[in-house]
Amino acid sequence: MIYPLLKPVVQVALRWYYRRITTTGLERVPREGPVFLAVNHPNALVDALVIGACLPRQVGFTAKATIFANPLVARFLARAGVVPLRRATDEVKAGSHAATDPTRNAASFDAVAQALARGAAIVIFPEGKSHDDPTLAPLRTGLARMAMHAAQQYGVRGIRIVPMGLLFERKEQPRSRVLVQVGEPVEVDALIAANVQVQTFTDIVSERLRAVTLNFDSAEDAERLQTVGHTMAALLEPTPTLGDDDTSLGTTLAVVRRLDRAHSALRQQQDAALDARATVFEQRVRDFRAQLDTRRLDVHDIGISAHATAGFRFAMRELLLAAVLAPVGLWGRLTHFVPIQLARALALRNVTSRDEPAMNTLLAGLVLVLGAYAVQTAVVGWLAGPWWALAFLLTLVPSASNDLRYGDRTRRARARMRAYFTFRREPELQRALLAEADLLRREAGALERAVLS
């Protein structure tokens, strides 16, 4: 049916847009049986695509009823297993009195309950909206009511609610990274047996979802803590090879959470001396990053060897890789440049929020890339015959994937070459940067111990 056909297409599209999608705790998602997957909602339609692509089992979705207004779209979504939900906010905008009617979603609740009775996994975004806020929005009660409805009205047993947190490195930026964290499941039967009410039920889910998401008091706190956290996470890790990723999002997330705990504890203590010390530390980190940015140096490269032997080995390795990978990547670039660039240009028109570029690019890219495949393959078939057309078609996806992966590597290689030649010319600069990095590491540990002791 539609889902098995769409999933590999979505997986390829996501791999092309995001450099890496990493999952942790995926074993907490049951392979079978009735499950709600409660997911935060930072990136519009992309959130649903990421969840569907990274899970081994088939999932169904809920979505706001307004996107079902188009009959063709409604038919497609229904065949893909999407259940419409009528949100109170949408009813208010439409001037409907149904906003205060708790039965407005009765048919949808029944459809979800029937799917759970068949052992389905249903994705729901309990915040009820996609947003750029630095913290989880208050959860709506719809998830709790659906779970209780399925258990009490349809007798579905063994329902679990699995919290899933999505962390986007830079959600609007192509070739950035995504982390999917799976939290501790909520056992619905146990809550119903304890006679837990809807709001308490919702609060329990919210607490589990907060454990796998980043939540800050303000956008200013988010910017400050993440800037310091990204820098310190890189300084705490050994220098990565070009084949490795940069400091993993999981490592960065752990450091940011440590900083957030220390920041919260510091505010509660109201210790002027410690507060001043933390302010000085934050400014030193910012000055360190500013110095790196001015010299166009990557924080991950300050510890590389600037010896001639290391440079020669680096050059030989990259030249050999280029001889093998560059021609394949070039083929992928030539066959995909126009549709992908056009998709990106269309996607960035009239953008009003950060959760639109990725979604728009993926949707436009899907149409334009598939259209380009059809046209290019038809031309090859007309010129050279059907077998050459088939061979041409089979090269398209692998060559484009290679172009993107090799492009990531060459960008890192250029940054490392720049650092190498800079440190060859100015060895005292590297010594100063390494000394400052060491001081920042030691001061970070000392501050954490002083604040949390």
Image (tube, rainbow, N blue to C red):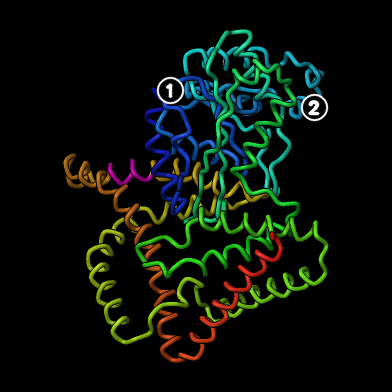
Amino acid found under the numbered disc labelled 2: Val
Occupied quadrant, residue 223: bottom right
Q: Residues within 10 Å of mark 1 (few under 14, many from 20)?
A: few
- Give the side of residue 54 with respect to residue 126, left or right: left
User: x%, y% of residue 348?
Assistant: 58, 53
Helix, strand or loop status at disc 2: helix
Residue at x-position 68% and y-position 44%: 131
Range covered by the magenta-colored residues: 372-377
Q: Quadrant of the C terminus?
A: bottom right
User: x%, y% of residue 346?
Assistant: 55, 50
Q: Residues within 10 Å of mark 2 (few under 14, many from 20)?
A: few
**Main SS class of the magenta portion in the image:** helix
- Give the side of residue 162 with respect to residue 446, left or right: left
Nearest the camera: 305 or 440?
Answer: 440
Against 252, residue 41 (above or below) is: above
Residue at x-position 51% and y-position 88%: 429
Residue at x-position 73% and y-position 20%: 197
The residue indicated by pointer 1 is: 32
Regarding residue 121, the answer to whether it shows in the image is yes
Q: Nearer the viewer, mark 1 or mark 2?
A: 1
Regarding residue 350, the answer to whether it shows in the image is no
The residue indicated by pointer 2 is: 92
Residue at x-position 66% and y-position 76%: 284
- Give the side of residue 123 with respect to residue 198, left or right: left
User: x%, y% of residue 320?
Assistant: 23, 70
Amino acid found under the numbered disc labelled 1: Glu
Residue 253 lies within the magenta run: no
